[in-house]
Image (cartoon, coloured by chain):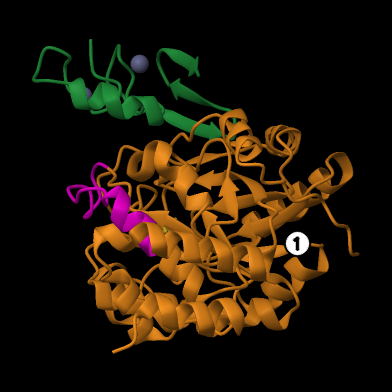
Chain colours: A orange, B green
Amino acid sequence: MADILAVARTQVLEQGIGLGQDQALDCLRLPDERVDDLLDLAHEVRLRWCGEEVEVEGIVSLKTGGCPEDCHFCSQSGVFDSPVRSAWLDIPSLVTAAQQTAATGATEFCIVAAVRGPDARLMAQVREGVRAIQEAVDINVACSLGLLTQEQVDELAGIGVHRYNHNLETARSYFDRVVTTHTFDERRETCEMVRQAGMQLCCGGIVGMGESLEQRAEFAVQLAELDPDEVPLNFLNPRPGTPFGELHPMGAVDALRTVATFRLVMPRTILRFAGGREITLGDLAERGVRGGVNAVIVGNYLTTLGRPADEDVRMLADLRMPIKALARNL
Amino acid sequence: MYCDRCGRAVVDGDHTACARARELEPPRYCALCRRRMVVQVTPTGWTARCAEHGERTG
Ligand code: SF4
Ligand SMILES: [Zn+2]
Ligand SMILES: [Zn+2]
């Protein structure tokens, strides 16, 4: 049988065709001593098909906690005994958060709400918040507000939301072990509406939730089928009180193997390090940015803290990786 | 006094892991009264408010 990295070099690096599910599984099964080769290839693929720039994003929680859904990894679900209480961010604080994000050199600012989908109150808050940011800050505004109706998709596109995040979270075959209050297909439908409305689609999920390697490969391919502009990859950060609160964080080498494999499945997407990076990878994050990743979330997350933005900006400078600049194509 | 991560009394058990976790988490419980606080994380900081004991920031 041909060596998977030799196959990937021809198929992905030279021809730009992402790996299929069985091929992805072969990568996820590579022994530790071949992980460096895998990461090096993923980095070459990223440079060839995406270029050398790294996209920097900041995120903020507009509405925290009290979500009626039961995603088993999430500290913001109101279904579990999590210590996270409900909170709303006011518009001036939202604008300040966008300004702080822009000051790091970031081009993306994502407004996130812990909801099944937006109600009229949240849509009004988003409308006002997006307008206030657009008036005061030079940054692309993205949103992540859960499942959408067609009207809501159209409205968000209409007010200039540039990218919408909605994750598949995990493989279809593992989804009902992670969420029972909505389905994989409901998530997928929102993703498809977002694309059709002309917004950029940001769609990823979380690894290290107890899924098998087969399911991890399945997940990568199911993401690729949606052809997302961006794939945020989170590593489970077990949250107290949630059903996954007692799981162990994924090992660093496994995390890197996963990152590189996702890159080989999706050669052209913006592959972003999202939550859980600090606890899973620590200083090895740098290896991930030389292993297929070309985007980072800087600063804090929604309910947990990240490392200070300037540390990441310095890391990119040390790696001589330019930060993507804002391109206004309105 | 209570652990601001897990809410148990500081003298009740070992909170070394809580202290380590707190490097990458805001506090969730008021250390004075163990009420759950309303916490807002922003890109560069956090605020945590206890209904009785006011606001902490970090
Ligand atoms: S829908 Fe979002 S906020 Fe709600 S429980 Fe699931 S992941 Fe958490
Ligand atoms: Zn504790
Ligand atoms: Zn108190």
Asked if residue A256 shows in the view, the reply is: yes
Query: As drawn, is A28 to the left or to the right of A286?
Result: left
Q: Mark 1: which secondary structure? A: loop
Q: Against A103, is A251 above or below?
A: below
- Is residue A294 shown in magenta? no
- In what quadrant does ligand 3 lie? top left
Does A77 sit above or below residue A313?
Answer: below
Point 39% across, 49% down: residue: A76
Where residue A25 sits in the image (x, y, percent)?
A: 31, 78
Residue type, numbered disc 1:
Val
Per the image, is A244 magenta?
yes
Residue at 70% over, 34% down: A104
Which region is colored magenta? Answer: A240-259
Residue with the mark numbered 1: A161
Q: Quadrant of the N terminus of chain A?
A: bottom left
Place residue A100 in its image quadrant: top right
Of B5 and B38, which appears nearest the observer?
B5
Q: Residues within 10 Å of mark 1 (few under 14, many from 20)?
A: many
Tell me where residue B4 appears, x and y as whole percent. Answer: 30, 21
Q: Position of residue A244 (x, y in %)?
A: 23, 54
Identify the main secondary structure in magenta: loop
**Farthest residue in the right direction?**
A330
- Is the C terminus of chain A in the top left, top right, bottom left or bottom right quadrant? bottom right
Image quadrant in which you'd find residue A180: bottom left
The residue nearer to you, when weighing A269 against A136, is: A269
Task: Name the chain letter of the residue that bears numbered label 1.
Answer: A
**Residue at the location (8% across, 20% down)?**
B13
